[in-house]
Image (spheres, rainbow, N blue to C red):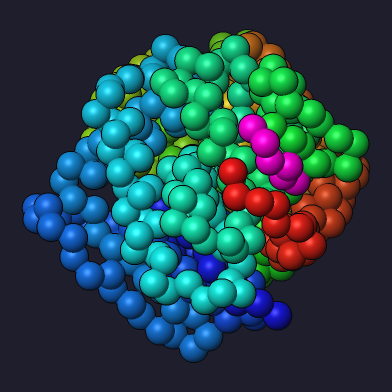
């Protein structure tokens, strides 16, 4: 089997095992199995502008190679083009996108630096798997250096239609660079369909078997909905420590039903609308007073980007207003935690809650929805309220699927979830559990790598 090289903006700590989520679980297994190399930013920002040597760390069959970013790279590539331009545009938030020519230069510069730094570590037969919006032009940079490797790309976040993405500066260049890959993977059918619209608008061709031709090159394009390690997450929810956590939750918040939300504090996650929907629940269905409590865990993220500071203030204001209006000396309707929480605690909190509230305005997939399902007690499961704009809604149709912008609809779905008979909860949960098992983290990475291994490499664009 050929060696796997994973490239992503950040490199996860594989030694943390089940404590790490997302990408670490999903690609960690493949790296361990095939042997491989994980390359990316080490998370440090240096004052020096001269290039520092990469840190190389070998742990069994896996080598990690990481680099710091300079202040300028951090500002332009990371905070600027990646997170103040691409992230909002790819989440359909043109109103929040901030364009700056210097940022675009920085984005190109860091992709070029990554290609230079990665090159000496590559062996002729390596298969390269690049992740996410920070690194869209990386394959084009590698091809410019004459590298003939098989290269796949997976986009973890949504891919919007031409009318939206065309607002990105150098939009055609960005699209063209995707054609330097051999395989491009998206989370959903909707994302693949959007990509095909771009291709047709460029005069390209879309074939029935997933092959797509444009800019003189044919590549494979497919959906690979990312999943979780269901058993590992479920196990975390039933340990002795987890049972104690659930006991504590119930003692401190003895209300009858617990609603839980867990998201990075990102404007794409729809948190202000979610809090307003909870307020509507208390207005429209007063029987929930003293009986329902809502815990929102929202750790800080990208606080150096302006739009993120704004949402924090908005959320704190809303949380205070709701508790001020409805709270009693012995009932706090809403708890808001602005911190990271160990994943084992999250698993316990999911299991101890009757309603999982996952209402992003836009999300590539949303793994929290799948984790909530995995953590439930099959005999007495909680119900999932899920935004139709989360990629997960394509698969998780047995959830209560809602429009997150319509706070009355979300409040009504919460009420349905709170009052749902156990039989219906069991049926819905069994169907959801089947779905998340059908295509889990392992199937996702196996499937992507199987398709990447099988695609022919075309001539470099
Ligand atoms: P994210 O936007 O980060 O990921 P998500 O898929 O929900 O969103 O994954 C978040 C992960 O972080 C989950 O595993 C969750 O348990 C964990 N987490 C959240 N809050 C936490 C807290 N307070 N403490 C500890 N852990 C916490 C991006 C895309 C998604 C896509 C994933 C994977 O935006 O759409 O599903 O990548 O492709």
244 up-or-down from 361: above or below: below
Q: Is residue 334 visible?
A: no
Looking at the image, the residue that sits furthest to the bottom is: 60
309 up-or-down from 37: above or below: above
Residue 326 percent across, percent down from the top left: 44, 19
318 vs 371, nearest the viewer: 371
- Asked whether 191 falls inside the magenta stretch, the response is no
66 up-or-down from 105: above or below: below
Residue 144 percent across, percent down from the top left: 46, 50
Looking at the image, the residue that sits furthest to the left is: 47
Residue pictured at 60% horizontal, 12% vertical: 163
Q: Which residues are magenta?
A: 215-220
Residue pictured at 68% horizontal, 41% vertical: 217
Left or right: 136, with 75 as reference point: right
Residue pictured at 73% horizontal, 42% vertical: 218
Which quadrant holds the C terminus? top right
Residue 280 percent across, percent down from the top left: 57, 14
Q: Residue 170, located in which quarter of the rendered image? A: top left
Q: Residue 86, located in which quarter of the rendered image? A: top left
Residue 293 percent across, percent down from the top left: 53, 34
Residue pictured at 33% horizontal, 31% vertical: 104
396 vs 224, nearest the viewer: 224
Which quadrant holds the N terminus? bottom right
Left or right: 16, with 461 as reference point: left
Q: Residue 335, located in which quarter of the rendered image? A: top left
Q: Is residue 214 visible?
A: yes
Left or right: 190, with 94 as reference point: right
391 vs 327, nearest the viewer: 391
Q: Main secondary structure of the magenta part?
A: strand
């Amino acid at each position: 089997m050929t060696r796997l090289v994973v490239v992503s903006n950040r490199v996860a700590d594989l030694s943390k095992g089940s404590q790490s989520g997302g990408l670490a679980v999903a690609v960690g297994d493949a790296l361990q199995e095939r042997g491989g190399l994980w390359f990316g930013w080490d998370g440090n920002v240096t004052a020096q502008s001269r290039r520092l040597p990469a840190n190389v760390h070998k742990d069994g069959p896996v080598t990690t190679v990481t680099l710091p970013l300079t202040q300028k790279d951090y500002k332009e590539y990371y905070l600027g083009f990646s997170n103040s331009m691409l992230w909002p545009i790819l989440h359909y938030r043109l109103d929040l996108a901030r364009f700056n020519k210097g940022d675009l230069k920085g984005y190109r510069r860091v992709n070029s630096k990554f290609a230079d730094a990665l090159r000496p570590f590559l062996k002729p037969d390596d298969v390269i798997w690049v992740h996410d919006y920070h690194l869209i032009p990386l394959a084009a940079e590698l091809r410019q250096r004459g590298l003939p490797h098989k290269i796949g790309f997976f986009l973890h976040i949504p891919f919007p239609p031409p009318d939206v993405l065309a607002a990105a500066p150098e939009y055609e260049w960005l699209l063209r660079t995707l054609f330097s890959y051999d395989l491009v993977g998206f989370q959903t059918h909707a994302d693949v369909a959007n990509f095909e619209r771009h291709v047709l608008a460029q005069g390209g061709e879309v074939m029935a078997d997933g092959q797509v031709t444009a800019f003189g090159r044919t590549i494979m394009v497919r959906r690979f909905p990312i999943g979780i390690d269901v058993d590992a997450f479920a196990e975390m929810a039933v340990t002795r420590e987890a049972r104690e956590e659930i006991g504590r939750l119930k003692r401190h918040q003895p209300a009858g039903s617990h609603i839980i939300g867990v998201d990075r504090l990102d404007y794409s996650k729809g948190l202000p609308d979610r809090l307003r929907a909870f307020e509507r629940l208390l207005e429209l269905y007063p029987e929930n007073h003293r009986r329902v409590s809502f815990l929102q865990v929202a750790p800080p993220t990208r606080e150096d980007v302006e739009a993120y500071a704004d949402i924090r203030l908005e959320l704190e204001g809303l949380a205070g207003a709701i508790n001020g209006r409805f709270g009693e000396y012995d009932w706090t309707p809403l708890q808001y935690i602005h911190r990271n929480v160990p994943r084992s605690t999250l698993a316990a909190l999911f299991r101890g809650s009757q309603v999982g509230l996952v209402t992003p305005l836009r999300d590539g997939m949303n793994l929290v929805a799948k984790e909530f399902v995995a953590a439930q007690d099959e005999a007495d499961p909680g119900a999932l309220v899920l935004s139709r704009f989360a990629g997960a809604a394509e698969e998780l149709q047995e959830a209560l699927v809602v429009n997150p912008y319509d706070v009355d609809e979300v409040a009504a779905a919460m009420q349905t979830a709170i009052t749902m008979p156990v039989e219906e909860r069991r049926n819905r949960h069994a169907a959801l559990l089947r779905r998340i098992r059908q295509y889990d983290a392992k199937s996702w990475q196996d499937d992507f790598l199987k398709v990447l291994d099988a695609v022919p490499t075309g001539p470099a664009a």
